[in-house]
Image (cartoon, rainbow, N blue to C red):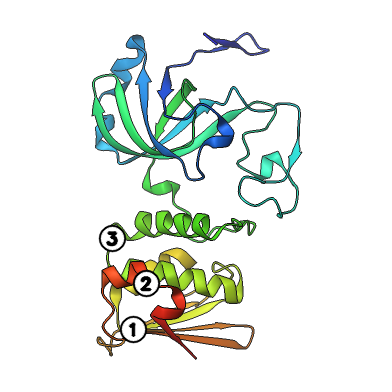
Amino acid sequence: MTELTITDGSTIRPIGYVESPWQSTLAVPLGGVAAIIHIKPEYQPALYRIGDHSHLWVLSWFGQADRSVLRVVPSKVNPNLPEHGVFGLRSAARPNPIALTLVKLEKVEADRLFVHDFDAVDGTLILDIKPYFDADIVFSPTTPYLPPREYQTRKALFYKQALAHHGEHCLGLELAVKMALMVESHFGQIQSPDLQLRVEGDACLADVLQGLTRARLANPARFFYQNNKPLQKRVQWRKNGQILTLTVRPNVDINTASQLSEQELFIQE
């Protein structure tokens, strides 16, 4: 596609294309992969100072998508989930397969943007690029609960969210991800407005859990933090009268936290 003509006579001209290791949309992992965006020579002046940004919104044309369906099951996430209209999902299938993807910009080399978390296949046409700004943040959005069926996929998505919020890989992040997986199995959606948590003793654990749960200190008050027991890492979860208390076992470091199961890491009360 060199250009796309709109009914009012306007045209859309692709500004570049994607270099990706994947050839099929169905094969691209959830959450995307590392890729390179190549920009056409005539549009390269528009890249001036793009390296000032850490994240970009990329609009692309998913040419392999099915344009004939309006309702789908997000089967790539979980085939057991209910059907939704495509305007309520990020499904590639839609009347006009224009994809909107938030990617992390690693570096810029001449006409090439090296990015992470891109779910486009090799050769995908790029329609536009816009920077991610602070004003784009919605800390506690209301969204449908669409949990991936596979444990490893759920874990990978929690890791991605945790790193995006906390900014570093540490013991607190490892513990928070494992705890979130355990709590999700017990209570369901951890972003539920009915789920409260009280964290004791570890600032990194508290920070990551707040990012994963989207729990605020007020309006409504769902998140509470106490730093009066630095040697003890303990989180109490409450929902609809039910209480689950998880205490991190002694002598856990970042290596053991990444290797042990949730049941081996936490004392459950």
| Residue sitting at x 43%, y 73% | 261
Q: Earlier in the sequence, mark 3 or mark 2?
A: 3
Q: Position of residue 27 (x, y in %)?
A: 54, 36
Q: Say which residue appears at 41% left-offset and 82% top-offset.
A: 266
Q: What distance separates the C-alpha of mark 3 from that of mark 2?
A: 11 Å
* Badge 3 element: loop
Whether residues under marks 3 and 2 lie with C-beta atoms below 8 angstroms apart, the answer is: no
The amino acid sitting under disc 2 is Leu
Q: Amino acid at mark 3?
A: His
Residue 229, placed above or below residue 125? below
Label ID, residue 175:
2
Left/right of residue 25 with respect to residue 249 in the rendered view: right
Residue type beneath disc 1: Lys
How many C-alpha atoms fall within 10 Å of the one at disc 3: few (<14), some, or many (≥20)? Answer: few
Residue 214 visible in the displayed image: no
Of the two numbered discs 1 and 3 on the same chain, state the one appearing first in sequence.
Answer: 3
Task: Give the camera-side residue of 22 and 123.
Answer: 22
The residue pinned by badge 3 equals 169
- SS label for mark 1: loop
